[in-house]
C-alpha cells in the first residue's frame, strides 16, 4: 500500500466546526462549543482592554520570533555537508513562517522522503517563489493518479481563459510579461546615444520600430482608410491574373517598371508578399547531400482552414463559405476605382507614395495559359464562395498528411531538376516565377516534399474555371491581410469571425490594441526588437547558468547511451559524436559582425516604414523577409543565423543545422532564473533543454547523422529497437483523449505527436543531470530549500517540471491543436511523460498499480 500524503483528506488548519459530533455528543461540551459560548457573551470594558493588550503582545511576539529566525538563518546559511538523499526537505520556522504560509496555503503535502533538518531560505525572493509554487497546486488531487492536476490545478483555477483567446497558459503569461518590456521600449520617448549600445545605427532602428508601432496604434487613421489598402492590393492581383497592364515599381532595376500578367504573375506577386497560394517554396540546406548548401524546397501551401480534417466538417464548411462570400462581396471588382477613392480621401501626395513596397522584379513575360474565356454572366459572391470552397477542399485532399510531412524526412526528400516542376505543373511558368526572386542565382535543382501534389494540382487547375481560381487567390490575400485593417472594416470582421469559430473566442472580444501592435511589430522586425529586449531582461550570469544546465544534460545524455539495451555500442559511439557536434545557442545572437548586425542593418535598409500607413508597412516587412530568404539560395548556411527572435518564449532544434537554440525570452520565470535552487532550474528549464536535445534523436531527428546529413547511420538492430519503443509511445499517446465540447471525445494522434513526445521523454536526462551535479551544487549553496514547501528536492524537481505546462484551453482550440499541432496537450505532456519515469513514482512513493506507477512492462522507456 502506498503511503498517503500527510493529512491528504484535510487541510493543515482544520475547522473545528466542521468536525462530526461523534457518539459522545451529549457529554461535555466540546472546546469549539465552549469558545462559541464565550464569544457570544457580551464583553465587559475590562475584557475589551485585556483583549487589545493580548493582541498587541501577540503581534510583538511574532515580530520578535521572526527577527530571531532571520538571525538564526544567517548563522546557518551554509548547509551541513553530506549526501542529499539523507537530507531533509524543509523546516517551517516557528510561529512566523508557520502562521503566514499555513494560513495562506492550507494544502496537504506528500510525505517528505526524510525528516526535515535543513534551514529554509527566508528572503523575500524565496518567500515569493514559494508562494507562487504553493498557489499553483491542487492538493485535493492524488499526485500518483493525476500529477498534472495536482501540480497545476491551483494555477488553472485562478487563470481563466481571456475572452479574446482560445487558450491561456504559463507560456502566454510570460509572453505577456515580455510584451510589457517591449511596450515600454516602443512607447518611450528616450532614444539612446549610439555610444550606449553596441551598434551605431541603434537610434535609426529604434525610430523605425516606434514608427511601425505608432502606425498600428493609430486606429483613427485605420478607420479612415477602411478597406482601401486591401482593395488596391486585390485589384493589382486581379489585373495581373487577367493579363491586364499593371506597373509595379521595384528595387534593383533602377526604377524601371515592368509589365507582368497571367497566373504565374499573380502567384509570384502574392508569394513575394508572404501570401501562400497553390504552393510554397523555402530555402534550406540540402540534407541529403550537403546540409549547409542552401537549396530550394517545394511545399504544399497553407490552407484557409487549419487542416484537411476541417473540410469534412459540415458546420465549419458552412461558416468558412460564409466568410469567403463576405470577403468576395467586399472586394468585388465592381467597387469604385481605388485610385480615385484614395484621391478623394487624401490630399494630393507625391507619386512615389502611391507605390507598394519594393521588390527586385525582373521582366515577367507573357503567360497565355490562363486566358480562358469568362462566363457571360459573372458569378455572384455566393456562387463563387461555394466553388472556391470546393476548389480549396480538393487542394487539401491532395496535400500530404501532416504526420508524413512532419515525421518522414526520407519520404519528403525528393530532389529533381528544376524543369521537372514545369513538366508536372505546366499551368505555371516556373522559369518566369523564379526570375522574380532570384535575379542573380537561378536554381537548377529543387527538392519536392510531395511529388504527387504537383500532378494533383495540375489536374485540379485544369478542371477549374479561371474566375474561381481568381477568387481563390483574392481570398488567400484577404485572409492574410485583413488583420492589418481597421476593426470596423467588413474584411476584418469576416476574418475575425472565422478565428472566433476555430478558436472558440468569445464573439466580439478583442485584445488590447497595444498587445496586437506589439505582436505585429515583433512579427515584422523581431530581431531589431530583440536587440533592445535583451538589454532590459537578460542580466549578467543568465547565459552562463543556462548554458551550464544544457551542457550538463548533454554530458549526462552521452554517458547514458552505452547503458541502453536497445542501442549497440557502434550506434552509441555515433550518437555521442552527434551530441558533441550539436551547436548550442543561448539568449541572443552575439557576434556583432554576423547575424545580429546584419539582421538589423537589413531591416533598416529594406523595410520602408511609413509613419502613418500600417498596411503598407506590414507589406514592406513581408517583402523584405521573402527577399532575404531567396537571397540565401545557392549560398552556404550562415551558422550564426537564428530562426526565433530573442524575445520569443520558445526553443527549437534545427536538424539540418544540428543546433539547439534557447532565446532569452524563455530564460525567465517560471522557466528559469539564475538565482533559483538547482532542483527548480533543472526541472523546468532543464526539461526544455533536454527536450530539444532529445529531438536530435527522435523519430525524425535520429535520421540526421553526426554531420546533419540525412541517412540511416544507426545499425539495423538499433533502429529496430528504437522503432519498437517509438510505436509504444505512439500507441500510448493515441489512447489519450480530449473533450470536444460537444459531449464527445477526440483521441490524440500519437503518430503526429511522436517526435514531441519522445522529446518530452528527455526529462529523465534533466533529472539525471541534476543528480550528477548535486553535491557540487550543494556545497555552493545552490540547493537551498524554500519556506512552507514540505517536499523533498526530488519532488520539487517534478513539480517544477509540471507547473510550466499549466494551461487552460477551450474545446474548439483543443480540437484544432490535436489536428494540427505535433505537441500533445499540456496534461498529457506531464502525465504521459511521468508514466514512463520510475524515478517519479519513487519520489512520490506511489503504490504499485497507481496510474503513474504502471508495471515495468507497460512503460515505454527510451532512455
Image (spheres, rainbow, N blue to C red):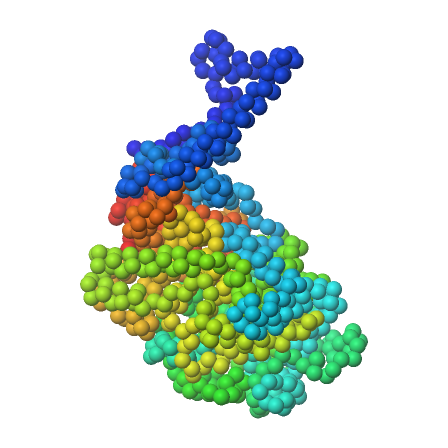
Frontmost residue, 97 versus 554 = 97
Q: In the figure, residue 223 lies in which quadrant? A: bottom right
Q: In the figure, residue 192 lies in which quadrant? A: bottom right
Q: Residue 307: where, in percent of width, then height? A: 50, 64
Task: Give the left or right position of residue 380, taking residue 140 as reference.
Answer: right
Residue 706 visible in the current orientation:
yes
Task: Give the left or right position of residue 183, taking residue 639 as reference.
Answer: right
Q: Residue 425: where, in percent of width, then height? A: 48, 83
Q: Residue 756: where, in percent of width, then height? A: 39, 59
Frontmost residue, 52 versus 332 = 52
**Residue sitting at x 50%, y 66%:** 645
Task: Give the left or right position of residue 547, taking residue 101 as reference.
Answer: left
Residue 798 visible in the current orientation:
no
Q: Is residue 848 above or below residue 179?
A: above
**Residue sitting at x 60%, y 85%:** 251
Q: Determine the residue located farthest toward the left in the rendered image.
A: 569
Frontmost residue, 164 versus 518 = 518
Task: Give the left or right position of residue 569, taking residue 91 as reference.
Answer: left
Q: Quadrant of the C terminus?
A: bottom left
**Residue sitting at x 23%, y 65%:** 573
Amino acid at each position: 500500500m502506498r503511503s498517503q500524503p500527510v493529512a491528504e483528506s484535510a487541510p493543515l488548519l482544520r475547522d473545528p466546526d466542521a468536525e462530526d459530533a461523534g457518539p459522545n455528543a451529549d457529554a461535555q461540551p466540546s472546546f469549539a462549543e465552549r469558545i462559541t459560548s464565550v464569544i457570544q457573551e457580551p464583553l465587559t470594558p475590562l475584557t475589551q482592554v485585556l483583549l487589545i493588550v493580548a493582541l498587541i503582545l501577540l503581534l510583538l511576539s511574532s515580530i520578535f520570533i521572526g527577527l530571531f529566525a532571520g538571525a538564526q538563518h544567517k548563522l546557518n546559511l551554509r548547509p551541513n555537508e553530506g549526501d542529499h538523499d539523507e537530507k531533509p526537505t524543509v523546516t517551517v520556522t516557528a510561529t512566523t513562517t508557520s502562521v503566514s504560509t499555513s494560513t495562506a496555503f492550507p494544502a496537504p503535502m506528500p510525505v517528505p522522503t526524510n525528516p526535515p533538518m535543513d534551514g529554509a531560505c527566508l528572503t523575500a525572493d524565496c518567500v515569493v517563489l514559494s508562494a507562487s509554487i504553493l498557489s499553483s497546486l491542487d492538493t485535493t488531487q492524488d499526485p500518483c493518479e493525476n500529477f498534472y492536476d495536482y501540480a497545476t490545478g491551483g494555477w488553472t483555477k485562478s487563470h481563466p481563459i481571456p475572452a479574446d483567446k482560445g487558450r491561456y497558459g504559463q507560456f502566454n503569461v510570460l509572453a505577456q510579461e515580455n510584451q510589457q518590456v517591449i511596450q515600454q521600449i516602443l512607447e518611450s520617448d528616450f532614444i539612446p546615444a549610439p555610444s550606449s549600445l553596441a551598434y551605431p545605427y541603434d537610434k535609426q532602428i529604434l525610430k523605425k520600430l516606434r514608427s511601425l508601432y505608432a502606425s498600428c496604434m493609430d486606429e483613427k487613421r485605420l478607420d479612415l482608410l477602411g478597406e482601401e489598402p486591401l482593395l488596391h492590393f486585390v485589384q493589382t492581383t486581379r489585373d495581373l491574373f487577367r493579363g491586364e497592364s499593371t506597373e509595379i515599381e521595384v528595387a534593383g532595376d533602377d526604377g524601371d517598371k515592368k509589365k507582368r500578367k497571367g497566373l504565374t504573375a499573380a502567384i509570384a506577386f502574392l508569394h513575394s508578399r508572404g501570401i501562400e497560394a497553390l504552393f510554397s517554396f523555402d530555402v534550406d540546406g540540402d540534407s541529403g547531400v550537403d546540409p549547409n548548401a542552401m537549396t530550394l524546397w517545394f511545399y504544399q501551401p497553407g490552407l484557409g482552414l487549419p487542416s484537411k480534417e476541417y473540410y469534412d466538417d459540415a458546420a465549419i464548411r458552412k461558416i468558412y463559405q460564409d466568410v469567403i462570400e463576405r470577403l468576395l462581396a467586399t472586394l468585388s471588382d465592381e467597387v469604385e476605382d481605388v485610385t480615385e477613392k484614395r484621391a478623394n480621401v487624401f490630399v494630393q501626395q507625391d507619386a512615389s507614395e502611391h507605390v507598394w513596397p519594393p521588390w527586385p522584379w525582373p521582366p515577367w513575360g507573357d503567360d497565355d495559359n490562363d486566358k480562358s474565356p469568362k462566363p457571360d454572366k459573372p458569378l455572384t459572391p455566393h456562387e463563387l464562395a461555394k466553388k472556391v470552397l470546393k476548389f480549396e477542399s480538393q487542394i487539401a485532399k491532395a496535400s500530404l498528411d501532416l504526420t508524413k510531412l512532419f515525421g518522414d524526412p526520407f519520404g519528403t526528400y525528393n530532389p529533381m531538376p528544376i524543369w521537372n516542376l514545369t513538366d508536372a505543373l505546366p499551368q505555371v511558368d516556373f522559369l518566369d516565377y523564379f526570375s522574380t526572386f532570384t535575379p542573380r542565382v537561378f536554381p537548377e535543382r529543387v527538392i519536392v516534399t510531395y511529388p504527387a501534389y504537383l500532378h494533383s494540382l495540375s489536374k485540379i487547375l485544369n478542371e477549374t474555371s479561371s474566375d474561381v481560381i481568381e477568387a481563390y487567390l483574392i481570398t488567400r490575400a484577404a485572409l492574410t491581410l485583413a488583420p492589418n485593417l481597421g476593426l470596423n472594416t467588413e474584411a476584418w470582421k469576416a476574418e475575425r469571425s472565422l478565428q472566433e469559430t476555430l478558436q472558440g473566442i468569445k464573439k466580439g472580444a478583442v485584445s488590447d490594441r497595444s498587445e496586437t501592435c506589439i505582436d505585429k511589430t515583433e512579427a515584422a522586425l523581431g530581431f531589431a526588437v530583440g536587440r533592445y529586449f535583451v538589454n532590459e531582461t537578460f542580466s549578467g550570469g543568465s547565459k552562463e547558468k543556462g548554458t551550464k544546465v544544457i551542457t550538463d544534460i548533454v554530458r549526462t545524455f552521452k554517458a547514458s547511451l552505452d547503458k541502453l539495451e536497445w542501442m549497440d555500442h557502434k550506434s552509441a559511439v555515433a550518437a555521442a559524436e552527434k551530441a558533441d557536434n550539436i551547436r548550442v545557442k543561448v539568449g541572443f545572437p552575439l557576434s556583432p559582425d554576423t547575424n545580429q548586425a546584419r539582421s538589423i542593418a537589413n531591416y533598416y535598409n529594406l523595410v520602408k516604414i511609413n509613419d502613418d500607413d500600417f498596411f503598407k508597412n506590414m507589406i514592406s516587412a513581408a517583402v523584405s523577409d521573402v527577399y532575404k530568404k531567396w537571397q540565401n539560395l545557392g549560398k552556404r548556411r550562415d551558422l550564426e543565423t537564428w530562426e526565433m527572435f530573442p524575445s520569443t518564449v520558445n526553443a527549437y532544434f534545427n536538424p539540418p543545422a544540428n543546433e539547439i537554440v534557447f532565446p532569452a525570452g524563455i530564460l525567465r520565470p517560471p522557466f528559469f532564473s539564475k538565482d533559483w535552487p538547482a532542483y527548480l532550474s533543472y526541472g523546468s528549464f532543464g526539461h526544455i533543454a533536454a527536450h530539444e536535445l532529445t529531438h536530435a534523436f527522435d523519430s525524425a531527428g535520429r535520421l540526421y547523422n553526426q554531420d546533419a546529413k540525412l541517412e540511416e547511420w544507426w545499425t539495423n538492430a538499433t533502429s529496430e529497437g528504437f522503432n519498437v519503443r517509438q510505436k509504444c509511445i505512439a500507441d500510448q499517446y493515441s489512447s489519450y483523449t480530449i473533450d470536444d465540447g460537444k459531449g464527445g471525445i477526440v483521441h490524440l494522434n500519437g503518430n503526429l505527436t511522436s517526435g514531441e513526445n519522445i522529446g518530452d521523454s528527455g526529462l529523465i536526462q534533466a533529472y539525471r543531470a541534476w543528480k550528477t551535479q548535486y553535491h557540487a551544487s550543494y556545497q555552493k549553496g545552490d540547493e537551498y530549500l524554500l519556506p512552507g514547501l514540505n517536499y523533498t528536492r526530488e519532488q520539487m524537481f517534478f513539480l517544477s517540471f509540471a507547473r510550466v505546462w499549466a494551461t487552460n484551453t477551450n474545446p474548439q482550440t483543443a480540437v484544432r491543436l490535436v489536428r494540427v499541432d505535433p505537441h500533445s496537450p499540456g496534461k498529457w505532456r506531464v502525465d504521459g511523460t511521468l508514466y514512463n519515469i520510475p524515478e517519479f513514482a519513487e519520489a512520490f512513493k506511489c503504490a504499485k498499480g497507481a496510474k503513474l506507477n504502471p508495471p515495468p512492462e507497460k512503460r515505454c522507456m527510451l532512455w
